Amino acid sequence: MTLKGRSFLTLKDFTKEEIDYLLRLAAKLKENKKKGITGNTLKGKNIALIFEKPSTRTRCSFTIGCIDEGGHPEYLGKDDIQLGYKESVEDTARVLGRMFDGIEFRGFKQENVEKLAKYSGVPVWNGLTDDYHPTQILADFLTLREQFGTLEGLNFVFAGDGRNNMANSLMIGCTKMGVNCTILAPKGLWPKEELTELCKTYGEVSGATLTLTEDVDGAVSDADCIYTDVWCSMGEEEKAAERIALLKPYQVNRQMLEKTGKDNTIVMHCLPAVKGNEITEDVFEEHADIIFDEAENRMHTIKAVMVATLGEGVPEL
Ligand code: CP
Ligand code: NVA
């Protein structure tokens, strides 16, 4: 399997086998790193890290992942470059493509990460847009595999803003990988119908079910994993009061966990968390080991994406 030269813009562009390959490569790179072994697959490669929105995990993962493999990362924050303001995205893309070997983009518009890929001519990696957060899903799935040994047949529930970047990407990833996916959210925050229909077609191939529901009891019954994310994504801060009122019944708390009927249900969160909103502090702390494994796995999985799409001498699996 080779993904050399490919961009990573949304999981829609990747098959189940390709996602599985990235997860296995990440597991191998993680095992190596734990033994103190790093690589040279990105030696001589320069990587641009464009951040229109702030980041802890994604920025650090790209930086450390790149350096671990012998590459050079360059951080370009929102006040450092003109992207889309004084210079068109197309022109910035063509400039960066002449200097860098790969580009990470975190920002608002999915359209911009797609333009960067189209005009730069080098692999571009989506570090989060308003619509998708595909590298996060790889970390989530690596963590699920570490916990359950498999992905296929797991019952996965996302509770919260069902139309945000995390819900969208989880839906795509789950239905591709054979994970039964439930989006538990008030109807006004359900994902777009077009994406739901597309994910159902993925589920027909993988055997995964996709359910959108407002019913907490029905959704969490038999859940292997309950996942949540902030109620207001970056850029939506002014919606806080409205969202709290809408989403309070969907808070991940002890009562919700008791309704799963299982004593091994895990809780996951992409972080950063607003404790007291989408998750209570006691539930967060009880599941903190897994949540921070998930955060660590951002680094191993993002490294895998860079190595697979740009690296030379990629480890055999
Ligand atoms: N989960 C995640 O993307 O975290 P950051 O916003 O800190 O990168
Ligand atoms: N939905 C969140 C995810 C953060 C990793 C946001 O976009 O802010």
Image (cartoon, rainbow, N blue to C red):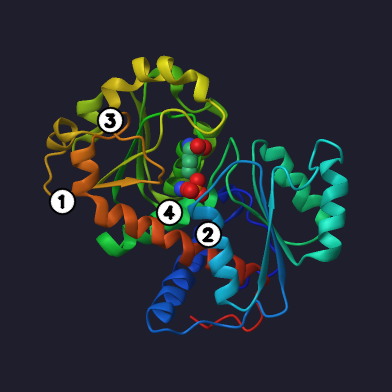
Check disc 1 and give the amino acid type. Asn
The kind of residue tagged 3 is Gly
- Report, in whole angstroms, how far the alpha carbon at label 2 lies from the one at label 3: 27 Å
Horizontally, residue 209 falls left or right of residue 105, namely: left
The image's mark for residue 291 is: none
- Name the residue carrying label 1: 264
Badge 3 or badge 4: first in the primary sequence: 4
Q: Is the distance from the Cβ of mark 2 to the nearest ligand 1 atom less than 8 Å? A: yes
Residue 177 circle label: 4
Picture coordinates of residue 115 (x, y %)?
Answer: 78, 45
Mark 3–mark 1 Cα distance, whole angstroms, equals 23 Å
Does residue 146 sit above or below 213 in this rendering? below
Residue at 46% across, 59% down: 298
- Residue that numbered label 2 is attached to: 60
Is the CB of mark 3 within 8 Å of ligand 2?
A: no
x, y percent for residue 169: 50, 43
Q: Work out how far the residue at label 4 is from the one at label 1, CA to CA, in angstroms.
A: 21 Å
Distance (Cα) linking label 2 and label 4 = 27 Å
Q: Along the polypeptide, which appears first: circle 3 or circle 1?
A: 1
The residue mark sitting in front, 2 or 4, is: 2
Q: Residue at x 65, y 76 (%)?
A: 42
Look at the picture and state if 27 lies above or below 316: above
Q: Which residue is mark 3?
A: 276
Number of marks: 4
Q: Amino acid at mark 2?
A: Cys
Q: Along the polypeptide, which appears first: circle 2 or circle 4?
A: 2
The mark that comes first in sequence, 2 or 3, is 2
